[in-house]
């Protein structure tokens, strides 16, 4: 069964293809929002001098993630980049200084879990950003061991068995396209094959009695099915036959192995929670809201059920007492959200993160008996005064065809009608990603230095219903881009924006949108900032990693099939239209990126240079698709601000 520590509050709540949201999304934290109510007006900033901070100061804010309770509930395992690169740490639940457990200086290393019955630790890392992660053991004596050795394989931890004597994982070592599922003994580390995949299913969950494994299979980005594998009979059964475009995806089995809980948008614009009776096949709804239910799961013995809802720019957590069916009261915080809930196996304690626009994620522990929460980490660099940062504002504007585009607005405190400032349209990754509220160091850095930032949720973004989510299919380079042009017009309507100094910035798919804007709407934006972005869809779709096989069909339906849509893919690929790029451009690229390979950036940079255009190029030799190392972030984002100050804010912007 999926343990609560495996849940993450990703906004990718469209259940048919949750993985697609990650395909072209940078491995960097970006502010991310959702649809809904009209946003309140921003509070006027008090008359005060705002201190500006360097990129080094912003990145001395520590990034932390994950949580796993020790077997005795005395410590929590988590990941931190305090040293400049992610490593595994442990912190006492009673409070105190975190202890560093791994000491990598080359590979960002992430905590997976404490062993449920002792003090050993599982962790994971890849090699230089290539995303071929292995699972490693940190023994009680400090020795480390690769539990999934081999070249060119990708291994992923799934969950612990109910008794904690084994764990489940999957690896593509047999066939790079498909992931087989294994059970590994926690004492001998011998492994047994549970399921061999030759179809391209996506793992969902395994029941505590090991009788069933739930899988999803994506047909398109808005249509998917659930398959149930019976380990005793070796039979695979489709349990969601349907017509039309309907999304189904498994969430979790209940601890007693009676039901499979799943997400679906059948008969609804939004994803809701339902369950399937494993004995009778009966289906019944469990919980619906006017937003997407992003995830759901149970505590170890089923005392609590946790639900995460993608509600208007934030994750809303609900925890139900299963005995009464009533929701519990949770700690309240001003201006932020509780995320990444994890309940200990004893069901006495809960770990969670609190995050706000001016408050980077900090780890807390909550005692269900005393109803008291304790803060265990302090992430924000003490040199930074939160009062110098800004709160975001959820806004909506009408696009060219009247469609409402929800977005997140960050206004510098120093901006005014008398002191107009430059602005940036920020485009998220995906393509089905989402811009949400919450702390983003790079956005706060840009805003602190006097740039308005508008994070756009163009059509095709998740979180606003399946119609909005599908509105960009086979329209990339056109309608979603036009939404970004309308975002520029919205910014120009604000009395504190310098209308001649509006640029566009984005990462991954957002980087593609930057290049598309400069190539297909060359007079709209003054500059472009492309972070790890696609320039040639033909090559990107032909060079996707083999382990994306399970959603290749859906990806082609979303963007185009290189075998049959070659001319259209060339038409929407900026690389083939560089003669139209006239505005200054900066490109950041990871040398080891497996998603957007380095030639994507090499060629568009070379093409712009050959025609005499202004282009800067920053390559990171030890990164993949995004940043995992502080030194590279400092170098990259400093280059971005220098570029913007020179070509957008400065006198050279119009040249």
Image (cartoon, rainbow, N blue to C red):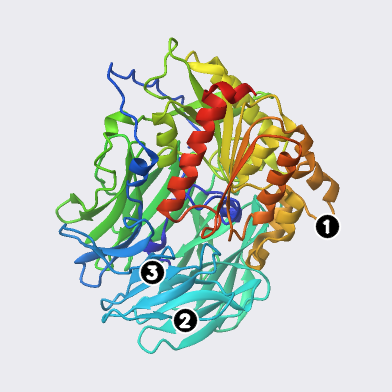
- Residue 174, relative to residue 496: is it above or below? below
Query: Which secondary structure lies at badge 2?
Result: strand
Write down the quadrant of residue 283 in the picture: bottom right
User: Left or right: where does residue 340 sit relative to residue 32?
Assistant: left
Q: Nearer the viewer, residue 137 or 4?
A: 137
Write down the quadrant of residue 188 in the picture: bottom left
Q: Which mark is residue 255?
A: 3
Mark closest to the chain's N terminus, 1 or 2? 2
Q: Nearer the viewer, mark 3 or mark 2?
A: 2
Tell me the residue at 24%/48% (across/down): 378
Location of residue 99 in the rendering, given as x and y in whole percent from the top left corner: 23, 64
Q: Nearer the viewer, residue 366 or 434?
A: 434
Tell me the residue at 47%/78% (across/down): 210
Location of residue 483 in the rendering, given as x and y in whole percent from the top left corner: 64, 30
Mark closest to the chain's N terminus, 1 or 3? 3
> Can you say which quadrant of the picture contains the C terminus?
top right
Q: CA distance from mark 1 to mark 2?
A: 38 Å
Tell me the residue at 78%/54% (across/down): 561
Location of residue 42 in the rendering, given as x and y in whole percent from the top left corner: 38, 22
How packed is label 3: few (under 14 Cα within 10 Å), some, or many (20 or more)? many
Which residue matches tag 1?
A: 563
Q: Which mark is residue 183?
A: 2
Q: Which mark is residue 129?
A: none
């Amino acid at each position: 069964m999926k343990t609560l520590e495996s849940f993450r509050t990703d906004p990718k709540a469209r259940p048919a293809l949750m993985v697609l949201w990650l395909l072209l999304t940078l491995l960097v934290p970006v502010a991310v929002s959702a649809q809904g109510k009209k946003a309140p007006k921003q509070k006027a900033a008090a008359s005060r001098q705002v201190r500006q901070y360097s990129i080094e100061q912003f990145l001395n804010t520590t990034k932390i993630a994950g949580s796993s309770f020790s077997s005795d509930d005395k410590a929590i395992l988590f990941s931190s980049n305090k040293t400049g690169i992610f490593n595994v740490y442990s912190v006492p639940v009673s409070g105190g200084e975190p202890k560093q457990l791994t000491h990598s200086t080359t590979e960002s290393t992430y905590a997976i879990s404490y062993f449920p019955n002792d003090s050993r630790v599982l962790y994971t890392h890849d090699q230089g950003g290539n995303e071929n992660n292995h699972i490693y053991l940190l023994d009680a004596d400090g020795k480390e061991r690769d539990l999934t050795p081999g070249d060119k394989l990708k291994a992923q931890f799934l969950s612990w068995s109910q008794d904690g004597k084994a764990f489940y994982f999957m690896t593509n070592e047999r066939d790079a396209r498909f992931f087989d599922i294994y059970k590994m003994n926690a004492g001998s580390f011998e492994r047994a094959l549970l399921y061999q995949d030759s179809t391209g299913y996506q793992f969902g969950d395994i029941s505590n009695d090991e009788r069933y494994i739930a899988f999803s299979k994506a047909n398109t980005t808005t249509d998917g099915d659930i398959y149930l594998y019976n380990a005793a009979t070796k039979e695979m059964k489709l349990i969601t036959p349907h017509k039309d475009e309907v999304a189904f995806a498994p969430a979790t089995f209940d601890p007693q192995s009676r039901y499979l809980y799943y997400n679906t948008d059948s008969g609804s614009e939004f994803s809701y929670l339902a369950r399937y009776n494993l004995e009778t096949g009966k289906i019944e709804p469990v919980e619906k809201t006017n937003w997407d239910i992003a995830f759901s799961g149970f505590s170890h013995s089923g005392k609590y059920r946790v639900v995460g809802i993608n509600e208007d720019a934030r994750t809303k957590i609900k925890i139900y007492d299963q005995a009464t069916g009533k929701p519990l009261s949770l700690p309240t915080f001003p201006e932020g959200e509780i995320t990444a809930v994890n309940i200990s196996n004893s069901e006495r304690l809960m770990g969670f993160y609190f995050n706000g626009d001016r408050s980077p994620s900090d780890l807390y522990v909550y005692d269900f008996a005393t109803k008291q929460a304790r803060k265990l980490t302090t992430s924000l660099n003490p040199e930074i005064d939160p009062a110098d940062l800004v709160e975001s504002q959820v806004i909506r504007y009408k696009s060219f065809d009247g469609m409402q585009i929800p977005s997140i607005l960050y206004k510098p405190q120093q901006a005014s009608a008398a002191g107009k400032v430059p602005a940036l349209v920020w485009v998220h990754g995906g393509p089905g990603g989402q811009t949400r509220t919450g702390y983003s160091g790079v956005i706060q850095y840009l805003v602190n230095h006097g740039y308005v930032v508008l994070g756009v949720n163009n059509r095709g973004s998740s979180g606003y219903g399946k119609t909005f989510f599908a509105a960009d299919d086979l329209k990339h380079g056109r309608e979603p881009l036009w939404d970004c042009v309308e975002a520029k017009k919205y910014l120009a309507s604000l009395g504190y924006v310098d209308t001649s100094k509006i640029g566009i910035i984005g990462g991954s798919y957002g980087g593609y949108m930057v290049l598309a804007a400069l190539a297909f709407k060359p007079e709209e934006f003054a500059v472009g900032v492309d972070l790890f972005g696609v320039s040639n869809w033909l090559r990107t779709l032909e060079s996707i990693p083999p382990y994306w096989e399970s959603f290749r069909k859906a990806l082609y339906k979303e963007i185009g099939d290189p075998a049959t849509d070659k001319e259209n893919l060339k038409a929407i690929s900026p690389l083939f239209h560089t003669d139209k790029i006239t505005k200054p451009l900066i490109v950041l690229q990871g040398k080891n990126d497996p998603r957007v390979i380095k030639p994507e950036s090499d060629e568009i940079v070379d093409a712009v240079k050959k025609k005499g255009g202004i282009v800067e190029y920053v390559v990171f030799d030890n990164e993949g698709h995004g940043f995992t190392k502080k030194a590279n972030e400092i170098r990259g984002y400093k280059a971005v601000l220098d570029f913007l100050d020179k070509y957008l804010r400065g006198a050279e912007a119009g040249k």
